[in-house]
Amino acid sequence: MGGKWSAARGRRPAGEDFRAVFADTLQQARAALTEPGLLERTVQTPLGPAPGAFLVHIRTNEYLAHGWDIADATGQSIDFEPELAEQALAAWRSRFAETPRGPGGPFGPERVAPEGASAADKLAPFPGREPVGGR
């Protein structure tokens, strides 16, 4: 995953056009995640060296979690593909069930999804997300 991916993760100066920065970062991520042979290679991830397939899972889960945050906060529909959200939640439960929660950890305390919640709304409480009532 070369320098482009590293640049995509770096901080951007305040005042830049956030839409242009996001579009550029997304293009860089797309290019990195579609590199031939990525799934079979060992790559550096935020959690250390891992198979490229694991990096794809990490990024997919990040986009789901933060996409949920943005949609909830701005009152937009959270219409993720239910099977994708269910698979992501199963993977999170498998990989991160024992991860410390609270201050200093990557996740807050797990929340309980409301009765009848969509697959996406069941995914969000695992890392500690709570609706802010935007929708």
Image (cartoon, grey):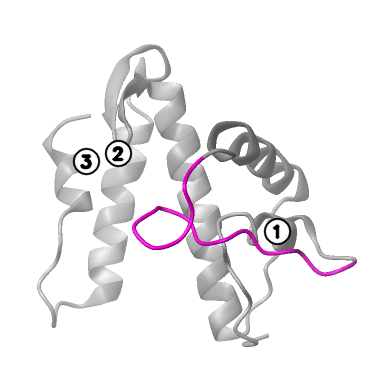
Position above or below: 21 against 133? above
* Type of amino acid at the residue the image marks with label 2: Pro
Q: Range of the magenta residues?
A: 99-115
Is 4 on the left or on the right of 90, as rendered?
Answer: left
Residue 38's spot in the image, x, y percent?
Answer: 36, 20
Query: How far separated are the C-alphas under marks 2 and 1?
Result: 24 Å
C-beta proximity under 8 Å, tags 1 and 3: no
Amino acid marked by disc 3: Trp
Residue drawn at (13%, 79%) of the image: 14
Q: Is residue 106 visible?
A: yes
Residue 121, quarter of picture? bottom right
Q: Residues within 10 Å of mark 3 (few under 14, many from 20)?
A: some
Q: Which mark is residue 46?
A: 2
Q: Which of the two discs, 1 and 3, sits closer to the camera?
A: 1
* Label 3, label 2: how far apart the Cα atoms are: 12 Å
> Picture quarter containing residue 54?
top left
Q: Marks 3 and 2: which is nearer the front?
A: 2
Q: Is residue 17 left or right of residue 59?
A: left
Q: Which mark is residue 5?
A: 3
* Secondary element at tag 2: loop
Q: Is residue 3 above or below residue 101?
A: above
